[in-house]
Amino acid sequence: MLFPNSDSSGDADSRLSRRRMLAGGLTAGVAASAGCVGSDESPNPDDSPTVFVFNTGDGTVSLIDPTEDSVVGTRDIGRSASFPSNQFTPTLTDQVTDSLWLNVGRGVQALEVDSLSEQRRIETGSGANWLEQTPDGAHVIVSAREPAHRQFRIDADADSETFGEVTAELDRRTEGGRGDRSGPGPCDITVHPDGEYAYVPDIYSDTLTVLSVDPFEITAQIDVDPVGTGPARPWMGTVAPDGETLLVEHNEGSTGTESIWDLSDPAMPVERVRLTADDGLGSRPLTNEIDADSERGFVFTPGSNDVTVIDLDGGTVQTRLDLGGSAFVGTWDPSHSKLYVPVQTNDEVAVINPETTEIVERISVGANPYGATSAQVRPAADSTSTMQVAIARLGLRAEPAETTYCIGNCACNHQLQQ
C-alpha cells in the first residue's frame, strides 16, 4: 500500500494500442467535423461552485457542478494530483485568480483557478507530498516523506512579495525511523480550524507530531501504540470542523485501523478509541473527511471497496457504503453539503449525502480519478479544451503529463525515488 503500481519502465499507461488510436481518432474527427470543439463547456458564470477531480490516467481534470451533479467541462492540465489541498480550499477559493494547491512530481504546485496554469512550483526533495492551506489562506503546510523527511511552510498569500516561497522548514531526518528509513516519515498534514496547530502522522516512528504554525516548530510528539503485535503506523488524518476531534488512519496489521483523538487541548491530542475490523471497520483505511456538524467521519477503505461511516461521539462504526470499486480520497463541495468520492477503478465519482449516509449519484469522469478538491468559482470556458482533452486521452501530447504520488492501484506512473 505504500508504493504505486508501475511497470519496470514506469510508463505503463503511455503505450498506445491500435484500437485506442482508432477509437480516439474517430472521436477527435467527429468533434472537429461537427464543429463542436469546446461543446462540453458550461455557460455558467465564473462564480459557480465547482468540484475538481484529477484524473491520473491522462493528466486531465473533470469539472463538476455540485448543484446539478454533472460534469460541465474537462481540461487537459498536463499533470495530476492525488492529495490536493482540500480542507479549507473550498471556502478560501472565491476568486478565479486564487490558487489550487496540488502535490505534483517531487514537490507541490499552485495553479490559478481561471486558467489552471502554474503559478508557483516548490521542490521538496521527495516524491511523496501532502499539503494543506491554513484557514486564513496565509500559508500552505507540507509534509514531505522519504527521503526528505521535512516539513515546509509556504507563503500562500498571492498579494505577498514572497508568494510561493518557503518561509520556514523543519528537517526531521535526525528523528530516525523504522528499518532503513532514515527519518520518521511525515505522512499527511491536517490543520486545526483555529490555524494555530497542524498535525502530522509519522508512519515510520509511530508518533503523532503537533506543529505550531507560527513560529514553525514542533510543539509535541505523542507516541502511538499498536493494538496488535505490529507497529501502529499512523499515516493520514483529518481535524473535524469544530476542532474537537482528530481522526487518524493506521496502516497497521493485515487490514488497518482507525483512531479517534480528543483535541480539547489542541496542543496535546489524546487518543480515545481505536477501531479495527472487529468493530466493523472496512479494509485498509487510507484517508477521511468529516461532515460539517463534526458528527460523522467518512473513512475511505479501498481494501473493501467502500466508505466506512463513523459516529465520532460514540466512537463506533455506523455503516459502510458500497462503492463497487476503490476510492482513496474525497472532497466536500464548497457548501460542505455533499461528499464527492472519486472511484478510481470505475472512472466515476460517487456523491454521498452525509445526512442520510447514502450514495445519491454516480458521475462518469476521466481515466483513473484519484484526488479532488473544490472552489466557489469555476475556470472560464475554453473553446480548445475538447480537442486538447482528446489528444491527452490518446497519449499524444508533446510532453508527458506530470505524475503524482498515489497509494495502491493508482495507475499514475509515479516513481518514488529514494
Image (cartoon, rainbow, N blue to C red):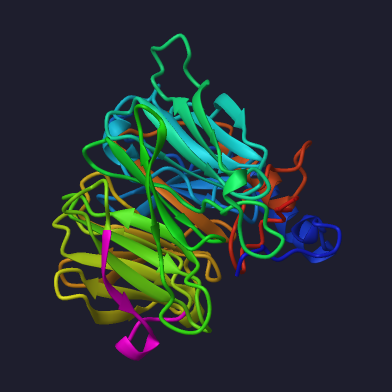
State left or right for residue 337 relative to residue 283: left
Residue 156 lies, in percent from the top left, at 42, 25
Residue at (25, 73) in percent of width and height: 310
Looking at the image, can residue 10 be seen? yes
**Rendered view: 413 above or below 119:** below
Indicate whether residue 281 is drawn in magenta. yes
State left or right for residue 116 relative to residue 28: left
Classify residue 208 by image quadrant: bottom left
Residue at (66, 40) in percent of width and height: 106
**Rendered view: 134 above or below 165:** below
Image quadrant where one finds the N terminus: bottom right
Residue 129 lies, in percent from the top left, at 56, 46
Seen from the viewer's position, the closer of residues 375 and 106 is 106
Indicate whether residue 209 is drawn in magenta. no
Residue 309 lies, in percent from the top left, at 27, 74
Residue at (23, 47) in percent of width and height: 266
State left or right for residue 4 relative to residue 418: left
**Rendered view: 411 above or below 211:** below
Question: Which region of the structure is painted magenta?
Answer: 270-283
Seen from the viewer's position, the closer of residues 366 and 251 is 251
Residue found at the very far bottom of the displayed protein: 278
Looking at the image, can residue 69 be seen? no
Classify residue 31 by image quadrant: top right
Residue 22 lies, in percent from the top left, at 78, 59
Seen from the viewer's position, the closer of residues 146 and 182 is 182
Number of marks in picture: 0
Seen from the viewer's position, the closer of residues 147 and 408 is 147
Residue found at the very far top of the displayed protein: 161
